[in-house]
Every structure is written in structure tokens, then in C-alpha cells.
Image (cartoon, rainbow, N blue to C red):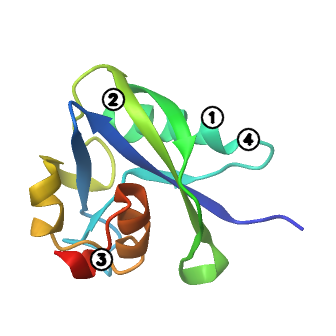
Amino acid sequence: MNERIVVGAALYDGGRLLAARRSAPPELAGGWELPGGKVEPGERSEDALVRELREELGVEAEPTGRVPGEWPLPKGYVLRVWTARLVSGEPRPLEDHDELRWLTPDQVWSVDWLAADVPAVEAALGLPHAAH
């Protein structure tokens, strides 16, 4: 069975989490998400994460751990999230995003996360959104 996996990065730098605002496709534009993308056939999820962060943000990052759980996405995909740390570069919105924000722990819920990302962000933080 060929799983359709999307990897998301809970990318941290100095205790801040990176959020990316979608510019495409239209139904997602304006919503915030954890950066990442689809795993290609035969590709390890961790390798896909590194590649997607390079393509979308122009940075080198290192996956540091898998966030427990997976979350359903449209079209039969599932979202799996890894924590990652920024190794080099300054993130820029190169593909499919028009704004990036580094969020401190008290700012995490100040952006309008896409519905599919809310439980993943909660899991990555270990903090339920309802507690905010």
C-alpha cells in the first residue's frame, strides 16, 4: 500500500516555532501551517522534510524527533510531524507561502492555523489549544 504522507516541520530556533502562511492553492490561501510537503515515492520522511524546507524556505534543517500521532488531510493524505532545528540560513517564503513568522510560546495561537494543522501544532507543543 502506497501511503500518501505529508511531512510537516515543527521548526524551532531559540524556542520559537516557525509558522508559514499559504498563498496557494486558493482554498488554503491565508491559512497558517507548519512548513513541509509531500513525501516522494521511495523517499524517507525525514529526507522529504529536509528537502521541502530547502525548497520552500531556503534553509538547512535537521529533524530531531517524530511528534506522536498522524492527522488526516484532504485527498487521502496523512500529516506526520517532526520537530526540527534550524541549521543554517534565514527562512524565506519561496514556494506556496507569502509570509513567515517566528512565534514565541505565548504567540503560537495568534495566527489562524489551518484546521488540519491545529491538532499537529498542539501535539508538537504538548499543549492543547483549549488551554490558551
Q: Position of residue 88 (x, y in %)?
A: 32, 17
Residue at coordinates 41% horizontally, 56% vertically from top-left? 124
Q: Amino acid at mark 1?
A: Asp
The amino acid sitting under disc 4 is Glu
**Residue at the spot x=35%, y=41% of the render?**
11
| Mark 2 neighbour density, 10 Å: few (under 14) some (14–19) many (20 or more) | some
Q: Do callouts 2 and 4 mark residues in contact (Cβ within 8 Å)?
A: no
Q: Position of residue 106 (x, y in %)?
A: 10, 57
Of residues 65 and 3, the one nearer the viewer is: 65
Question: Is tag 2's residue or tag 4's residue first in the polypeptide sequence?
Answer: 4
Q: Earlier in the sequence, mark 2 or mark 1?
A: 1
Q: Nearer the viewer, mark 3 or mark 4?
A: 4
Residue at point 22%, 37% (across, down): 15
Could you classify mark 4 by the number of other residues whose Cα lies within 10 Å: few (under 14), some (14-19), or many (20 or more)?
Answer: few
Distance, label 2 to label 4, CA atoms, is 20 Å
**Image point 24% across, 53% down: which residue?**
19
**Farthest-out residue, top:** 88
Towards the viewer: 39 or 71: 71
Cα gap from disc 3 to disc 4, whole angstroms: 28 Å
Mark 1 or mark 3: name the one nearer the start of the chain. 3
Cβ–Cβ under 8 Å for marks 3 and 2: no
Q: Kindly report which numbered mark, 3 or 2, lies closer to the viewer in this rendering.
A: 2
* Residue named by callout 4: 43
Quarter of the image for the N terminus: give it: bottom right
For disc 3, the marked residue is 26
Residue denoted by label 1? 47
- Give the Cα separation between the discs numbered 2 and 1: 15 Å
Horizontally, is 30 left or right of 74 in the view?
A: left
Reading the image, the residue beneath label 2 is 58
Report the Cα–Cα distance between label 3 and label 2. 23 Å
Identify the secondary structure beneath mark 3. Answer: loop
